[in-house]
Amino acid sequence: MLPFAIIIPCFNEASRLPIDKFTEFLSKYQAVKFIFVDDGSKDDTANLLKQLQQKYKQITIIKLAANKGKGEAVRQGIIKAKSEDYEYIGYLDADLSTSLEDFYELYLLAKNNLLDIVLGSRIQKIDTKIERSFTRHIIGRTLATIIDNRFKLGIYDTQCGAKIFNRNILNEISDKPYKTKWFFDVEIIRRINQKNNSYRAMEIPLKLWKNRKQSKIGIFSLPVVVKDLYILLTKC
């Protein structure tokens, strides 16, 4: 059984993909597998990924013909990693708002403590550094409160894009497409709760999280977010 695979969903990431950070990590941690899922990008993302793959054999690229959304990109990456028999599989945002080093520490925590789920969390503490706009923080906390009141998940930050799962529960989260674009993370936890009540999980505050420039979330995303929230609360 192979140790750890990291799924990186990518959609038009040519101007945001921190190639130098991936290069540094890949050179240092050669046992870690990366699965980049190109979610129908229209820019130069595919070429950048191919150039990186030529240098590092631990990279696999999945190319989706059309944009399916981050949730489906992650799901396709999970299916691929599961077929290759990895013990732990995680996913992370392409802009590395969470650093690869911090994410690797989450993996070690999961492995050393025999955990099934580790969730990164953007909790502002005295020993953490979380950088995001006040507006996004308020919106995020409002959504998290609504979701927790509905589903009682007991999770502070469901939307943080840094999550790791043991392969034993991957069937629960990859057997069918997600119904929402913005809240597929919540759907994942809901699926696990519905099928498995004996897993071991921890939510861990990230040491550093930095909202990168050129974020894809803006005022024009609001109607889609509201629609997805309605679907999540009524149909998931």
Image (cartoon, rainbow, N blue to C red):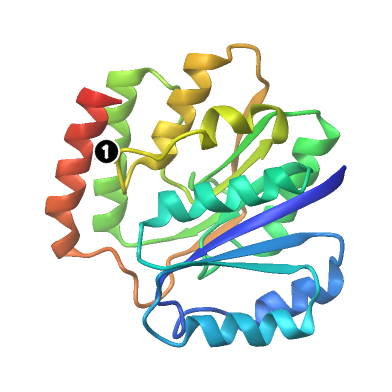
SS state under label 1 = helix
**How packed is label 1: few (under 14 Cα within 10 Å), some, or many (20 or more)?**
some
Q: Is residue 209 left or right of residue 54?
A: left
Instruction: From the image, tell me which residue sits under label 1.
Output: 143
Is residue 158 visible to the viewer in this orientation of the structure? no
Image position, residue 214 (x, y; %): 34, 77
Q: Residue at x 49, y 48 (%)?
A: 122
Residue 201 % position (x, y)? 64, 26
User: Residue 13 versus residue 2: which sits nearer the camera?
Assistant: 2
In the image, residue 56 sits, relative to residue 128, either above or below, namely below
Residue 20 location in percent, x, y? 66, 84
Amino acid type at circle 1 is Leu
For residue 167, side relative to residue 121 (left or right): right
210 lies left or right of 115: left
Q: Quarter of the image containing the C terminus? A: top left
- The residue at the point 36 percent across, 57 percent down is 69
